[in-house]
């Protein structure tokens, strides 16, 4: 028997069984007291007619609950009539239909895991996905048990004047002793993971939205009073998302009230609880003085994401957690199309593909790789991954590409209509798409069921006499892996632009690769073209085609597909940097290839039509991406070669950078719109190159931008450049800037996160010392996930040259922090451990040192299930 499978607590998709009982109604009474909370639950249970089960016992989930009493139809159970473990409660014998009442005591103030009911600063709030509801009461805490919830909250009126839960407010009133209550009712049946409640002293921003059927929806954004000025952007984003979902998917909001609450201590970005979203402050608050342009985009995207879940997740939900990507992949696809429509299609696509190629491809080739529809897990919290979210979205995007927008819309209409109010599977989603299109998706399902990034090798052949151009495709199908159904969008580019395909007259074509090897020929091609393959990144794969550097340069300026123009530039840089890495290891002097300089020059002198794209094209692939592409990761070679390129491009093109920097100075006050965001991104990139090159006046520019900026994007960009500048003259300036920045913003936690991040990501030597000191800083708080991510997370994930420092002290630092965090917040601990799991990718000494720390973590007593799963699967 394989040990891994023998682990107790591995849950398998193949073992799925319909729920034995259903809960039609759930009535909760949650009383928040000084030191604890008392939860009374009244559940209307009945046998599930669709279950095969004919036994008499009932098993409920429950964790960290102190049971006061439990009764069936008003009859208190005797001790011998039920039994409990740390994770469940079993009643020996229950009728076919009955009312179960229970009373438990829980401890929100001591709940540092941020699952269930917990306290964040001054407010009480909940996080129930995936399995947090069982920390609130004994329940059938699984997504295929859907119930109608009525919730009464009772608390001190002065401490918690605001009492919220899902749905509509039914009634509220005052009680003796300065206490009060409110009762909420949610008319939509939902799984327990979508339950939420909030109690606290919150300020509110009110707004409203008129739906397509002319219903007025109240919008309320609840924040701490100090944050009232930071709500406009989230509210505008929400209204845009509501209108977009009506227009693009025909989806209208269903309740009369939509509430969002901002909390500071939160394990993830946000949560789509029905009618009562709960957000990490970092994903909802925004103001130009405190928030960067990137963070503005993130707020827009996350607000939309949670809103879109109301249909893709809440109205139609998941049967079990193996179907997580049913809601997450689809919803990420929806939010990314929304963001693209609000800004630039190509920019959004480049951002998404960068994330996929760096983080998801790396996950998919490592020990925590899993299919988009996993077949087993130990701890479901570990499966909220870039594979479930981002690769899941790519798979939905491929369906969209194969069907085209009209059929895809018909498919989604059918899916929503057919499954409204139900808990369903990924197969149900694909079946709706298959039905409207008459297409066969059986091979396509491999995208959901196999892990790993497919590789597609392509070669070309031109027969001048027959005027025939052929492309040979080869999917390297590995052991036990079946070939994928891959949509490859392509075009053929000549000096005079895209060649039309004789079959259609179009310049784009979608080829469907289904075989291990496949050849496609195009007739009537008068000259040998350069193929533009995988336009718009039409499939989440690694594509190999032996482009020459000249061909890449050619595509960079001539491809009609914006994404592929950017991609050609990236491939060109990657090829050159990989060559330089070989030179670096041989101790050879490095030299900048003139072709890169020429390619950059061409882009730099383009008319300023799309400055955001210009900035992306002029940004070199990250160290993280170069590492992902390496057989064996050579941290120093990657770092030095990339720094070298930045320096050389900075000085070789110094005049252009200076021109760009000066031409794009802000004029007439800050504005947040796509054009200004683009202009800032290009200007700040130019400043970075000037700094990299050590240009004489660059320190003056950066200093004055830092002190005079009227927005956080420019200020932080200047600070980042200063902090990373190796020049002696920059040292004192950087220290002073960091100190004054801290002075100015010590009252703003989200700005302090940025201040921490800039320093944790600093690539200059002695990074670990800096990070250890940051953790001793009074503003650091290890119980706040945003702070942990900003310091430890950024250091270990985004500062390779320091994290992988020679003596292995970075690894020890990470292991110690994981073990400390694991005692009070296992979700964050397990996530933080990921960088160490990649030990196989590094050379001898590093690999060993990482392995040693990972073993140390696994050998530590009392590990959480979360951390145990990650550590054990990667050793
Ligand atoms: N479902 C949420 C989303 O993607 C994310 C989520 C899952 C979450 N589990 C969580 C958020 C735990 C906070 C804590 O929108
Ligand atoms: Zn989501």
Image: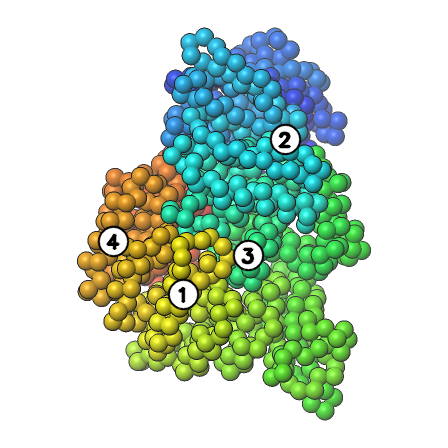
The disc, 4 or 3, on the residue closer to the chain's N-terminal end is 3
Q: Position of residue 318 (x, y in %)?
A: 64, 39
The disc, 2 or 3, on the residue closer to the chain's N-terminal end is 2
The disc, 1 or 3, on the residue closer to the chain's N-terminal end is 3
Between the C-alphas of marks 4 and 3, the distance is: 33 Å
Circle 1 or circle 2, nearest the eye = 1
Between the C-alphas of marks 1 and 3, the distance is: 20 Å
Q: Position of residue 568 (x, y in %)?
A: 52, 73
Left or right: 281, with 182 as reference point? left
Asked whether 823 or 312 is in front, the reply is 312
The disc, 1 or 2, on the residue closer to the chain's N-terminal end is 2
Kindly indicate the quadrant of the structure image that contains residue 728.
Answer: bottom left
- Tag 4 residue: 737
Please say if the residues under marks 4 and 3 sit with CB atoms less than 8 Å apart.
Answer: no
Q: Position of residue 757 (x, y in %)?
A: 34, 51
Q: Position of residue 190 (x, y in %)?
A: 63, 31
Circle 1 or circle 3, nearest the eye = 1
Q: How many marks?
A: 4
Q: Is residue 783 above or below residue 53?
A: below
The disc, 1 or 4, on the residue closer to the chain's N-terminal end is 1
- Tag 2 residue: 256
The N terminus - image quarter: top right
Kindly indicate the quadrant of the structure image that contains residue 49.
Answer: top right
Between the C-alphas of marks 1 and 4, the distance is: 23 Å
Q: Give the crowd class for mark 3: few <14, some 14-19, many >=20 residues within 10 Å.
A: some
Between the C-alphas of marks 1 and 2, the distance is: 45 Å
Q: Is residue 85 above or below residue 746?
A: above
Looking at the rendered structure, the secondary structure element under dot 3 is loop
Left or right: 415, with 761 as reference point? right
**What residue is at 72 percent from the left and 42 percent from the top?**
416
- Tag 3 residue: 343
- Tag 1 residue: 664
């Amino acid at each position: 028997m394989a040990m891994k499978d023998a682990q107790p607590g591995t849950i398998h998709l193949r073992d799925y069984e319909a729920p034995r009982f259903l809960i039609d109604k759930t009535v909760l009474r949650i009383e928040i007291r000084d030191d604890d909370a008392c939860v009374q639950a009244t559940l209307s249970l009945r046998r599930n007619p669709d279950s095969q089960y004919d036994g008499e016992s009932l098993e409920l989930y429950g964790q960290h609950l102190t049971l006061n009493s439990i009764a069936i139809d008003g009859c208190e159970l005797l001790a011998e009539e039920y039994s409990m473990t740390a994770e469940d409660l079993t009643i020996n014998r229950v009728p076919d239909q009955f009312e179960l009442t229970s009373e438990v005591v829980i401890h929100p103030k001591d709940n540092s895991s941020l699952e269930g009911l917990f306290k964040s600063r001054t407010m009480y709030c909940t996080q129930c996905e995936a399995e947090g509801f069982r920390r609130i009461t004994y329940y059938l805490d699984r997504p295929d048990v859907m119930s109608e919830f009525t919730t009464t909250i009772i608390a001190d009126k002065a401490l918690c004047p605001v009492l919220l839960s899902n749905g509509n407010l039914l009634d509220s009133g005052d009680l003796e002793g300065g206490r009060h209550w409110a009762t909420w009712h949610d008319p939509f049946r939902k799984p327990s993971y979508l339950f939420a409640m909030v109690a606290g002293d919150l300020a509110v921003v009110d707004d409203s939205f008129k739906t397509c059927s002319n219903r007025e929806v109240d919008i309320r954004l609840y924040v701490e009073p100090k944050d009232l000025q930071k709500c406009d952007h989230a509210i505008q984003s929400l209204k845009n998302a509501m209108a977009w979902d009506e227009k693009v998917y025909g989806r209208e909001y269903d309740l009369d009230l939509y509430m969002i609450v901002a909390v500071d201590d939160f394990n993830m970005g946000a949560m789509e609880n029905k009618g009562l979203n709960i957000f990490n402050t970092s994903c909802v608050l925004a103001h130009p003085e405190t928030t960067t342009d990137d963070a503005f985009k993130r707020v827009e995207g996350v607000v939309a994401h949670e809103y879109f879940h109301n249909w893709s997740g809440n109205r139609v939900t998941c049967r079990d957690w193996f179907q997580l990507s049913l809601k997450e992949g689809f919803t990420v696809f929806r939010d990314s199309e929304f963001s693209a429509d609000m800004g630039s299609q190509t920019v959004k696509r480049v951002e998404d593909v960068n994330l996929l190629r760096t983080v998801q491809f790396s996950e998919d080739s490592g020990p925590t790789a899993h299919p988009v529809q996993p077949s087993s897990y130990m701890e479901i919290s570990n499966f909220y991954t870039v594979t479930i979210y981002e690769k899941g979205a790519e798979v939905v995007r491929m369906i969209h590409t194969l069907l085209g927008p009209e059929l895809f819309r018909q498919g989604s209409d059918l899916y929503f209509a057919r499954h409204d109010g139900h808990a369903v599977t990924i197969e149900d989603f694909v079946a709706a798409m298959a039905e409207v299109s008459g297409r066969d998706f059986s091979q396509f399902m491999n995208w959901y069921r196999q892990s790993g990034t497919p590789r597609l090798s392509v070669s070309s052949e031109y027969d001048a006499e027959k005027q025939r151009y052929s492309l040979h495709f080869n999917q390297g199908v590995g052991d036990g892996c079946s070939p994928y159904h891959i949509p490859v969008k392509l075009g053929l580019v000549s000096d005079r632009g895209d060649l039309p395909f004789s079959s259609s007259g179009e310049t784009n074509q979608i080829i469907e690769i289904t075989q291990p090897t496949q050849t496609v020929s195009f007739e009537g091609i008068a000259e040998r073209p350069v193929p533009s393959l995988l336009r718009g990144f039409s499939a989440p794969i690694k594509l190999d085609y032996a482009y020459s550097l000249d061909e890449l340069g050619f595509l960079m300026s001539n491809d009609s597909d914006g994404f592929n123009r950017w991609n050609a530039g990236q491939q060109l840089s990657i090829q050159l940097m990989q060559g330089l890495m070989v030179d670096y290891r041989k101790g050879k002097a490095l030299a900048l290839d003139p072709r890169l300089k020429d390619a950059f020059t061409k882009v730099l002198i383009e008319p300023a039509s799309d400055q955001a794209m210009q900035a992306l094209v002029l940004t070199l692939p990250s160290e993280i991406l170069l590492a992902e592409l390496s057989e064996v990761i050579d941290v120093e070679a990657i770092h030095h070669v990339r720094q070298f390129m930045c320096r050389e491009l900075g000085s070789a093109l110094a005049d252009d950078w200076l021109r760009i920097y000066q031409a794009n100075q802000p004029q007439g006050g800050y504005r947040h719109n796509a054009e200004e965001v683009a202009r800032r991104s290009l200007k700040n990139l130019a400043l970075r190159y000037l700094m990299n090159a050590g240009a004489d006046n660059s320190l003056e520019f950066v200093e004055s931008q830092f002190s005079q900026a009227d927005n956080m994007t420019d200020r932080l960009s200047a600070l980042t450049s200063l902090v990373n500048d190796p020049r002696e003259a920059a040292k004192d300036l950087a220290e002073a800037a960091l100190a004054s920045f801290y002075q100015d913003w010590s009252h703003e936690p989200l700005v302090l996160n940025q201040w921490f991040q800039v320093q944790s990501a600093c690539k200059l030597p002695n990074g670990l010392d800096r990070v250890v000191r940051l953790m001793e800083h009074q503003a650091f708080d290890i119980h706040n996930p945003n702070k942990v991510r900003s310091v430890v997370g950024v250091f270990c994930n985004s500062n390779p040259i320091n994290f992988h420092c020679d003596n292995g002290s970075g690894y020890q630092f990470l292991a110690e922090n994981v073990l400390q965090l694991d005692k009070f917040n296992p979700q964050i601990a397990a996530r933080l451990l990921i960088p160490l799991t990649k030990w196989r990718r590094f050379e001898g000494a590093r690999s060993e040192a990482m392995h040693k720390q990972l073993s140390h973590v696994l050998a530590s007593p009392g590990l959480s299930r979360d951390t145990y799963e990650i550590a054990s699967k990667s050793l």
